[in-house]
Image (cartoon, coloured by chain):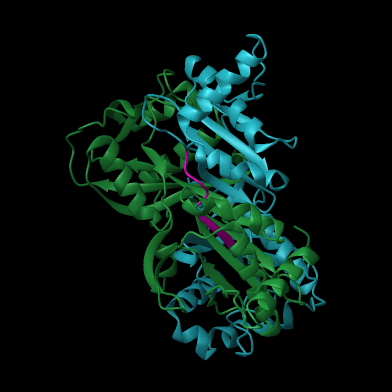
Chain colours: A cyan, B green
Amino acid sequence: MSTSTIALAIEKQMVLENGVQQVELLNGVEDSYGGIILNMEKPMESEAFVYSLRASISQWKQQGKRGVWIKLPIQLVNLVEPSVKEGFRYHHAEPDYIMLVSWIGNSTNTIPENASHRVGIGAFVINDQREVLVVQENNGTFKGKGVWKFPTGVVNEGEDICMAAIREVKEETGIDTEFVEILAFRQSHKSFFTKSDLFFVCMLRPLSFDIQKQDTEIEAAQWMSINEYAAQPFIQKHDGFSSVANVCLAKLEKDYAGFSRIPTTTASGKTSYVYFNSRDLSKL
Amino acid sequence: MSTSTIALAIEKQMVLENGVQQVELLNGVEDSYGGIILNMEKPMESEAFVYSLRASISQWKQQGKRGVWIKLPIQLVNLVEPSVKEGFRYHHAEPDYIMLVSWIGNSTNTIPENASHRVGIGAFVINDQREVLVVQENNGTFKGKGVWKFPTGVVNEGEDICMAAIREVKEETGIDTEFVEILAFRQSHKSFFTKSDLFFVCMLRPLSFDIQKQDTEIEAAQWMSINEYAAQPFIQKHDGFSSVANVCLAKLEKDYAGFSRIPTTTASGKTSYVYFNSRDLSKL
């Protein structure tokens, strides 16, 4: 349907109803950046949606609005194509919804970027006998290679890095831990399609010691001498792994300070952790 | 169209063509996890697409494939609804494409998570007179509040944190810098819809000193005494800001070690930076 056809259709519909405007305006919520967020929830025919969207945008333009967001739950997938044909672009998607956006303002487009990074953790859990908690995985790159590695996992949206490390260790090995420090991190690119990756090496103190491994992901789990861990040919061969192993050894032998955490309150009132070298900060 | 209707339609089409299979199979690329990636590029009618997808999935199931990915450029938006009706879910989207996925394997679903974090930087640029490079912004939370703040910005997909800091300082103030260390970072949640946020405070050494501010984003830029910066009521009032200011002061006064970087090569042969406390690592 071309622009002029729709304009005509809207006009026609209005005339048919004896001049009373019958096009339902969409119920958008204003954001704090001069934008409108449409949370579409009820099923709607594509054609009626297009009429309403057109009329609503016309009104929002008059009001000086700039960005228009449309959140469509996957049940309303029939409205994706009409939205795109009305000039909307994809912004991001999760399994159960897609967010589309269109810039209707005259000023420079300031639509914020989509999430660009996945975040992972590796857990360095060491006991008093200088033994590190290691696993062999059932899936992925390391499957069947006999490499003993730290428990690792993905940090969920909304999850603190320190909490993700504790959770993953518990899930994979049954060991309870507490967070000590972030010893190092690595940023890599194109890890998953075009997305980048941040991987944090977290030191944790074990609070229990009997391993109960998870069967679906983990082939084997054990406590292993840290020197034996670091001496594995795979670790030695890859400088990403060997440099992390060196940092862990330095933590045990050289009074290495990583970043510990303090809870803070952001300007908008939310709690968030700041990570920094607290040992050096507290120097006199 | 129900499952049985389509099965019938495929069968009917085959019969009409005298038993010769006329359903075009889709051309998927195998990934290294037992999956198939369909990069749809050419326009296709929805109905023909559904027939082909059905036949292709049937074949992939026989081959023991597990995850099926469909990448649809925004021009092929007509194929989004049929894909969802065939059981696909959204995985992620960027302005110009959407990625859908379906798990066709019998084993546990191991579809990787979508990107969950946006990454930002704040640049601590300090000259020999203990003056820090600060700006006032035209837009956003700090507009019109008179707060002098570090240059900040978003790290692009595929961009190194250290490079993003150098780029943002150059863009906002015209100052050339080199990367020194990451002094601290903060993780916060629900910063943008449901996404989380990682913000890295990067220390940079200035290589030039004449400010040429960018006009569209920056209201004002200057070199300001670090003590004057830290004493601003806004900074003092918010512990997220004041703790970062304290870390910066510690860097100047207390031999504070942040995380510096080394380039490493990942197991898959890519270069990526590892960040850690190199001063402590090099202790004897």
Q: Position of residue A129 (x, y in %)?
A: 69, 80
Residue at image coords 59%, 67%: B69
Q: Position of residue A26 (x, y in %)?
A: 65, 25
Figure check: A151 above or below A230: above
Horizontally, residue A230 falls left or right of residue B245, namely right
Whether residue A123 appears in magenta in the rendering, the answer is no
Q: Position of residue A281 (x, y in %)?
A: 49, 47
Quarter assignment of residue B64: bottom right
Comparing B113 with A167, the one in front is B113
Quarter assignment of residue A203: bottom right
Horizontally, residue A151 falls left or right of residue A239, namely right
Is residue B65 visible to the viewer in this orientation of the structure?
Answer: no
Comparing A214 with A59, the one in front is A59
Whether residue A117 appears in magenta in the rendering, the answer is yes
Comparing B64 with B244, the one in front is B64
Comparing B173 with B26, the one in front is B26
Horizontally, residue A213 falls left or right of residue B176, namely right
Which range is magenta?
A: A112-120
Residue at image coords 64%, 37%: A46
How many marks the image carries: the answer is 0
Is residue B205 visible to the viewer in this orientation of the structure?
Answer: yes
Residue at image coords 27%, 27%: B215
Residue at image coords 72%, 74%: B11
